[in-house]
Image: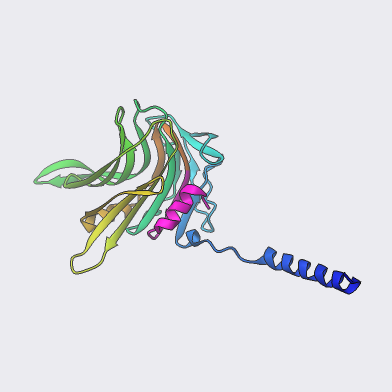
Amino acid sequence: MSRYGILLLAFLLIACGKQAEVAPVSNSLLDGLVAYYPLNGDVLDVSVNKRHGMLANGSFAPGHAGNALVFSSVQSSAAEAPVGLLKQVCTISFWVNKTDPTKSSSIWTNQFIRDEKIAGTTTTSTYGFRFGSNAGDSYYSLALQLGVLSNFYVNIPFTPNIWEFYVVQFAQTSGITMGADVTVYKNGVQLLKQSMAPVFLNALESSAVNRLGVGEGKLDEVGVWTRALTQDEIMQLYKKGF
């Protein structure tokens, strides 16, 4: 090859290298992302929103990816995320490992309690959202609670001492009859999709603090979106993460 040809080839290689270096990377998972907590030794939100959480009673240990949040107290949450993360149309995702099935574990709780008078009697009512399990259960319960009048529960089986990936989506449906759907994925596969009254979704937008980890277990890679993720996006999160 001539000296001119060598110089031309070198120029093209440099130009192509620079072009590849500055090429933007498209990631649809960033669309509608409210917060993402890798939980690698802190409760920092690595999204552009910087909605950082606070470490309360938890610690950190090797997890599914890097470190994970460890919780082992039935009295207080391991960490807390800011209020207002969950909306009527939202997706939450997380990796969880229940290391002792004989103990209770509340993975995510956003609930508030107030006294109400019903038929002249004062009753303590619970409003909000909870994903967790009771001591000895072989399943997690997904619960939306609206006081003493109505509650919505779905049971999802789990395997102890194994890291498992869950995605929970809430969304209003459109049409002549307004409704709402809750969809649950485990390890990238849809487990269930169930209709419920749209009033249940109002419980998501409470002013209660998001409590992460109460009881016993490990939690990792927590994400929140203001939209429903696609099946491909959920599978990407399960296989590769961001």
Q: Say if 84 sits above or below 76 in the image.
A: below
Pick out the residue farthest to the left: 119
Front in this rendered view, residue 112 or 166 = 166
Q: Quadrant of residue 67?
A: top right
The residue that appears at 17% across and 41% down in the rendered structure is 123
Q: Quadrant of the N terminus?
A: bottom right
Residue 168, x across and y down, in percent: 35, 50
Picture quadrant of residue 71: top left
Q: Is residue 1 magenta?
A: no
State the extent of the magenta-drawn residues as a range: 221-242
Q: Position of residue 26 (x, y in %)?
A: 55, 64
Judge left or right: residue 158 versus residue 178: right
Choose top left, top right, bottom left or bottom right for residue 198. Answer: bottom left
Q: Residue furthest top?
A: 102
The structure's colour scheme is rainbow
In the rendering, at what x and y percent does residue 241 appear?
51, 50
| Residue 174 coordinates in the image, percent (x, y) | 25, 67
18 or 112: nearer the viewer: 18
Residue at the spot x=18%, y=47% of the render? 150
Q: Is residue 239 above or below residue 174?
A: above
Q: 107 or 164: nearer the eye?
A: 164
Q: Is residue 239 magenta?
A: yes
- From the viewer's perspective, tell me whether residue 121 is left or right of residue 196: left
Number of marks drawn: 0
Farthest right residue? 3
Residue under the point 20% across and 56% down: 197
